[in-house]
Image (cartoon, grey):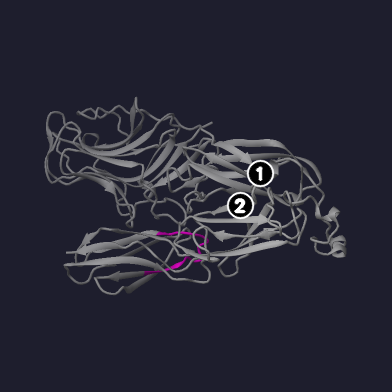
Amino acid sequence: MRSGTSVVRVGWQRGGWLVLSLLACLCLAPASAAATSYHVFLCEIPYGVDAGSPASTEDVSYSTKGTYSEGGSFCEAPDGVMVARMNGAVEHSADEEGEAARFTAPDGLSIAGFTLWRYEQIGNTQSYGPPVTSIDYGNASSQIAVAACSWISGCSANGIKSVPLSSKNEVSAVSLNGMTYIEWSAVCAATGGTCPAGPSSEEDVYAADIDLVDDTPPTVSDVSGPLIAGGTLSGKQTVSFDASDGQSGVYGGSLVVDGHTIVSQILDTDEGHCQSLGLTNDGQRSFDHVQPCPPSLSASLTLNTGTLAPGTHSLELIVEDAAGNQAIAYDGTIMVAGPPPTGAAASATGPIGPGSPLALRGPANGTNASDQAKLTARWTSTTKTTRTTPYGATNHITGHLTTSTGQPISGAMLDITEDPAVQGARVAALAGVRTGPTGAWTLTLPKTIPSITLRIIYRSHVNDTVPVATATLTLRVHAGIALHITPHTTSVNHTIHFSGSLHGTPIPPGGKQLVLEASSGGEWIQFDTLATGAHGRYHASYRFKFPGPVTYKFRVISPHEADFPFLAGSSNVVAVYER
């Protein structure tokens, strides 16, 4: 339940002279976030070590009424800003001529509170034609002003333009109920007259921290897998499911055994967008995208039943969205077998596999399970054991499991391990796959997977430590890089700004080295190096020293390094025209 200071409602007749009780100072308590809400940052991240890094603006729209007004997002440049300005070069007519920028919460979400970092100024103080800058919030039935600046209220400017994230630039509203948009604008508020030509009026927003409410839990279907299929379990067992959430997106999954969370993980980081930045003090997650997590996905979780005591245990599968809404997808019991021998008993028996007593090996792994099994594995796109792809490609593996005489081994669990191609990495287990009625099996790798060596393993009995059949495949992935440049047209002694992201994880400590290259029609020439931040983002700038006209092409290269599990990669190419 949210609590906080109620918002003073300010009457403002935007089309005329009436501007009542405009707030010069907002003394509001920090928002107390809802239990099912999350924070999103717009334009720039306002806190922490990444303060000033660009954030998403895809849910901000701009509307111009009349002429010589401007609006738009320039958030990828240093000291980025979302602009709403009424150009002072010409007279402006009444009836709200000017520029407005609006953040609109996606369908199914509402705004619980917000803080904006803004600078505003009034460019013309003629009493017969006052411009007005304002910050408002509302929904389809009401609009409320939380801050405004006009000549008639004695305001000419608010904030510090040279320090975008200064506390003096903060404007907040809390304990909102059912609000769906925030708007900032610079308009002509004259009645039946004009706002004369003069300096521009502006309401520029550098960053926003918006608390979004999501009251809808995710939907989960097709829950299946050996973990919940019944029977006595041993070793690692998986449960698979499909999940969807059209609001904040599907965030994580958990396995709760006997009331204790044993497994908890993000189901799809979506290239880092679905990883909380952890920059709030109210216990809620924070992201740099409005809808940070995938709207739907297929996933699986693995439980090592060998860590549980023999006997019956309660089991819950819980799936949650980015806001913390939870859906209990499975609530039942599982039966766990006794663990294989350890310590002196294990040393006495040695490795468990073909030739070991059946009492130690446990149940057969699949119908027609055999110690003479044959396992095949191949990429669907090539017969070679090594596949090389760009970042973000879809990679499918298929294969068969049969006896030595060709009978299918169906319903068998195959273990999958990955050995990332990065210095010092440890071999890790991926979710296993189960063979079908014909012994066939398929595996689709995550699009964010790095360069790895995959080992597919079949053990003919569930407690075996010695596999009876294996297959190995190798994947090599080129680094993926996104490049943005502003502006695309420039001239001598002016500067262009580079920004973007290096995809994939883990980013090396201290950042991944990147190389900036340029070409004017011939070979590519290296002109700068830089390092990414902890989340793979980067920024750079270049000042032109010689006059044009000439068109340059720019790209960013990620060289191969031993501590980054991707091959060398190149960004998209961006052209800049120098006049």
In the rendered image, the vertical position of residue 261 relative to residue 455, given as above or below: above
Local packing at callout 2 (Cα closer than 10 Å; few below 14, some 14-19, many 20+) is many
Does the stretch in magenta take in 139? no
Classify the position of the C terminus by image quarter.
bottom left
Per the image, the residue denoted by label 1 is 225
- Residue type at mark 1? Gly
Q: Position of residue 381 (x, y in %)?
A: 49, 59
Q: Secondary structure at mark 1?
A: loop
In the rendered image, the vertical position of residue 497 relative to residue 9, given as above or below: below
Per the image, the residue denoted by label 2 is 441
- Residue type at mark 2? Trp
Quadrant of the rendered image containing residue 548? bottom left
Q: Which residues are magenta?
A: 501-515
Local packing at callout 1 (Cα closer than 10 Å; few below 14, some 14-19, many 20+) is some
Classify the position of the N terminus by image quarter.
top right
Q: Nearer the viewer, residue 333 or 550?
A: 333
Please tell me which residue is depicted at 85% across the width and 65% down the height of the picture. Answer: 347
Q: Is residue 288 rendered to the left or right of residue 356?
A: left
Q: Nearer the viewer, residue 364 or 538?
A: 364
Q: Is residue 260 visible?
A: no
In the rendered image, the vertical position of residue 574 relative to residue 287, given as above or below: below
Q: Secondary structure at mark 2?
A: strand
**Which comes before the other along the chain, label 1 or label 2?**
1
Q: Position of residue 379 (x, y in %)?
A: 53, 60
Quadrant of the rendered image containing residue 185? top left
Does the stretch in magenta take in 513? yes
Quadrant of the rendered image containing residue 257? top right
Q: Position of residue 341 (x, y in %)?
A: 84, 57
Which one is closest to the eye, mark 1 or mark 2? 2
